[in-house]
Image (cartoon, helix red, strand yellow):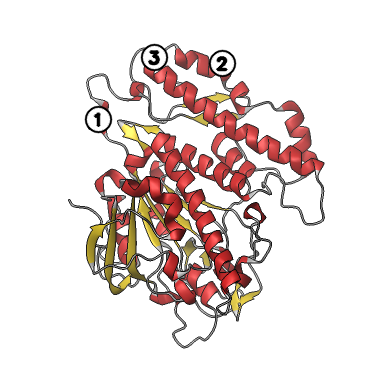
Amino acid sequence: MNIILKKQIERRTFLRGMGTVLALPMLDAMVPAFVKAASVGSPTRMAILYFPNGVQETTWNIPAQVGVSALPDVLPLTLAPLTKYRNDITVVNGLTNNGGRALGDGPGDHGRAGAAYLTGAHPKKTFGKDLQAGISMDQYAAARIGSATRFASLELGCEEGIQGGNCDNGYSCAYSNSISWRTPNTPNPPEIRPRAVFERLFGVGDFERDPKVRARQEKYQKSVLDAVLEDAKRLAGALSADDKRKLDEYMYGVRDIETRIQKTEKDSALKPTLDKPAPSVPENYDEHTSIMFDLMTAAFQTDSTRIVTFLMAIEQSNRAYREIGIADSHHGLTHHGGDREKIEKCIKINQYEVQQFAYFIDKLKAAKDGDGTLFDHIMVSYGSGLGAGHDHDNLPTILTGRGNGLFTLGRHVTHPNETPISNLHVAMMDKMGVQVENFSDSTGKLGYLSDL
């Protein structure tokens, strides 16, 4: 570790030891002594959170005229978990993803919804190897600014899907299971294993898939923090009291994530089943999403990446949410045919997903970053490629994070019908420093995002 004691240390300083590389959060000591931290600024980050299978319109949408209005005191039922965050979100109506529509190709809304969400492209109807969609906005941005960080982008998820075969009326499973596309022919399948993400952020080499080899490694490997402890002690001697506190809080957070992953792996070994999830994948959805959100927060806080996509479940997901007492397939429930009991279960699932989103908002607001928090310096969109009735217009969309000034929060924004969601993506890329006149079917940068 190359540290100049009592002077500025490099932003990309790492703690090292025993094959472990631990990136650090932004510390005051990383700012030149003659420059105030506030004047340096923090980079803008971007997270795209996606949930599948659409929503029930009456419990999500807020009727309003085109333009900006205040959020109502009482939010719709599905958004009720966000009530305490009314001043931290913007609810957006009127956005459309035309690429997800049939356009003469017949059934297949789920496959098209996932593949078109960030690409804006109408995917080719095939379940062979001849996939064709478009470059997704996260990868378009990553190709231009990704060299500034250890990882150009991270693609994460909470449900594994296969990448071949026919999943939706002639559309390949690859379309339903990925929202990030590196090229028009190459989807980026999300990583769903917390241990694999942890190893990538805080270890070296690839995650070992062979359980026997993994067991031998872990026999000799303690916590990643144990490995870098001596380096951390040397660093602490060069830090102010405030920086020491930041370092302690950060390392405590890393250890907490690691402990929870270890517990998941232990529980998985103690409860063998024929269809249990892969090692390190929690069976409980709350625990799975919270660990992944914690890992995303750590990745942003250490500036390991500035771009993350997160697939909360795959399109056409048949997940059963037993955590909230629902044993039915989510996708099956959405084809409810007006059955009130099934509709109520769909609402309950959507509300449960919103609760997970609320957890992420809490994490961002608590994570210190430069002269503020990550919440001040990140843009987050939470939404789906399907609206009510599996339509591709008026997509459910919520924005949070202040995005270094891009988002003015605490309000409801309604755009004219058929406003491309790509307009939002153009605005977000522009804030990342990626100037693009248009992207896919965009007609310009989305308005009403801020008062600037």
State the image quarter where residue 269 is shown: top right
- The residue drawn where x is 64% and y is 52% is 323
Q: Nearer the viewer, mark 1 or mark 2?
A: 1
Q: Amino acid at mark 1?
A: Ala
Q: Would residue 226 appear left or right of 355 to someone viewing this image?
A: right
Q: Residues within 10 Å of mark 3 (few under 14, many from 20)?
A: few
- The residue drawn where x is 62% and y is 21% is 226
The residue nearer to you, when weighing 72 against 232, is: 72
Q: Residue 241: where, in percent of width, then height?
A: 39, 14
Which disc number belongs to residue 38?
1
The residue nearer to you, when weighing 353 against 425, is: 353
| Tag 3 residue | 241
Q: Residue 189: where, in percent of width, then height?
A: 57, 59
Real-space CA distance between mark 3 and mark 2, rounded to the nearest whole angstrom: 19 Å
**Looking at the image, can residue 154 be seen?**
no
Q: Residue 322: where, in percent of width, then height?
A: 67, 55
State the image quarter where residue 343 is shown: bottom right
Upstream in sequence: badge 1 or badge 2? 1
The residue nearer to you, when weighing 394 against 20, is: 394
Q: Secondary structure at mark 3?
A: helix
**Looking at the image, can residue 123 be seen?**
yes
| Tag 2 residue | 230
